[in-house]
Image (cartoon, helix red, strand yellow):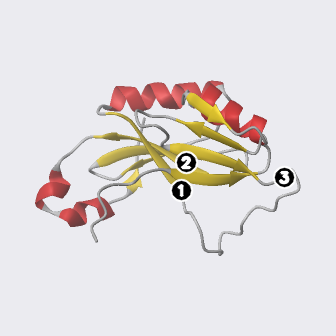
Amino acid sequence: MKIEGLGHVVIKVSNLERAEAFYGGILGMPLVARTDEGNMSFFSLGNHHDFALMAIGDDAEHPSARSTGLAHIAFKIGNDLDTLREARSHLDEAGIKSVPIDHEVTQSLYFKDPDENQVELYVDVSDAWKEDPQEVLQGKALEL
């Protein structure tokens, strides 16, 4: 068996409308389908569906920092620091606090969605990982 690529990611959310407003509205991801039952929404980033939300109820508990599961979702938004600065400004205007991190091969913004899922927006800035895969382990504060 050989994995050919990552097909899609589905995350659990408490409130589908609120999560759609965040991912579709604030982050600008195109919504392409919604189940008739109203518990799932599907977004496309060029494939039939790359990202989906599954509502599990307004009373859903947030996972603790020490529980297993998804650590964060990362979305590539470009290849230059100006694009990342624009994204940070957009998040600031929406009242979303983000933390910039320089990973050497990427520069990133980390923040939380309305259900406390961690999200990363990043720009590729180096191909150094092709020569030394360990380069992806870098991480330090980034000034924007």
Disc 3: which residue: 57
Disc 2: which residue: 119
Quick check: 63 above or below 103? below
- Name which residue type carries label 3: Gly
The mark lying in front, picked from 3 and 2, is 3
- Name which residue type carries label 1: His
Q: Position of residue 68 (x, y in %)?
A: 61, 74
How far is the residue under mark 2 from the one under mark 1?
Answer: 5 Å
Point out the tag, 2 or 1, that comes first from the N-terminus. Answer: 1
User: Residue at (54%, 27%) from the top-left corner?
Assistant: 30
- For label 2, the crowd category at 10 Å Cα-Cα, with few meaning under 14, some 14 to 19 and many 20 or more, is some
Check contact, mark 2 vs mark 1: CB within 8 A: yes
Disc 1: which residue: 72
Quick check: 78 above or below 131? above
- For label 1, the crowd category at 10 Å Cα-Cα, with few meaning under 14, some 14 to 19 and many 20 or more, is few
Q: Position of residue 80 (x, y in %)?
A: 30, 31
- Name which residue type carries label 2: Val
User: Residue at (29%, 60%) from the top-left corner?
Assistant: 136
Q: For residue 117, say whether it is visible.
A: no
